[in-house]
Image (cartoon, rainbow, N blue to C red):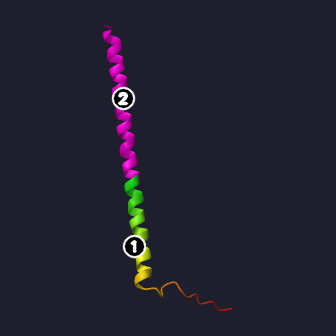
Amino acid sequence: MDIPALSMALSQNQILNDVGIAMLSKNLDFMEDVGSGLVESIDAVSELSVNPNIGSNIDIRI
């Protein structure tokens, strides 16, 4: 049994595992930001549904 080769393989596997976890963490943070942006846009649209006259008319003078 080649102990140094086994140690090297386990070390590489641990590094790949750590990189995968870091990428998942960054992706989770990004998705939380996207989700909060979506909630804000839904809140803005719900304001229009509560008061439908907002933004429906444009005053133009020439």
Please state the total of marks drawn on the protein image.
2
Determine if the magenta segment contains residue 26: yes
Return the residue found at the far top: 1
36, above or below 27, in the image: below
Q: Residues within 10 Å of mark 2 (few under 14, many from 20)?
A: few
The magenta segment is 1-30
Image point (35%, 45%), residue name: 25
The amino acid at mark 2 is Ile
Q: Residues within 10 Å of mark 1 (few under 14, many from 20)?
A: few
62, above or below 9, in the image: below
CA–CA distance in space, label 1 to label 2: 42 Å
Residue 62 locus on image (x, y percent) = 69, 91
Residue 33 locus on image (x, y percent) = 40, 57
Image point (48%, 88%), residue name: 53
Q: Quadrant of residue 14?
A: top left
Query: Mark number for residue 10?
Result: none
Residue 34 locus on image (x, y percent) = 42, 58
Q: Quadrant of residue 24?
A: top left
Looking at the rendered structure, the secondary structure element under dot 1 is helix
29, above or below 51, in the image: above
Residue that badge 1 annotates: 43
Residue that badge 2 annotates: 15
Image point (38%, 30%), residue name: 16
* Dominant secondary structure, magenta: helix
Q: Which badge, 1 or 2, comes first in the chain's sequence? A: 2
Determine if the magenta segment contains residue 29: yes
3, above or below 22, in the image: above
Return the residue found at the far bottom: 61
The amino acid at mark 1 is Asp
Q: Are marks 1 and 2 in contact (CB under 8 Å)?
A: no
Looking at the rendered structure, the secondary structure element under dot 2 is helix
Can you say which quadrant of the picture contains the N terminus?
Answer: top left
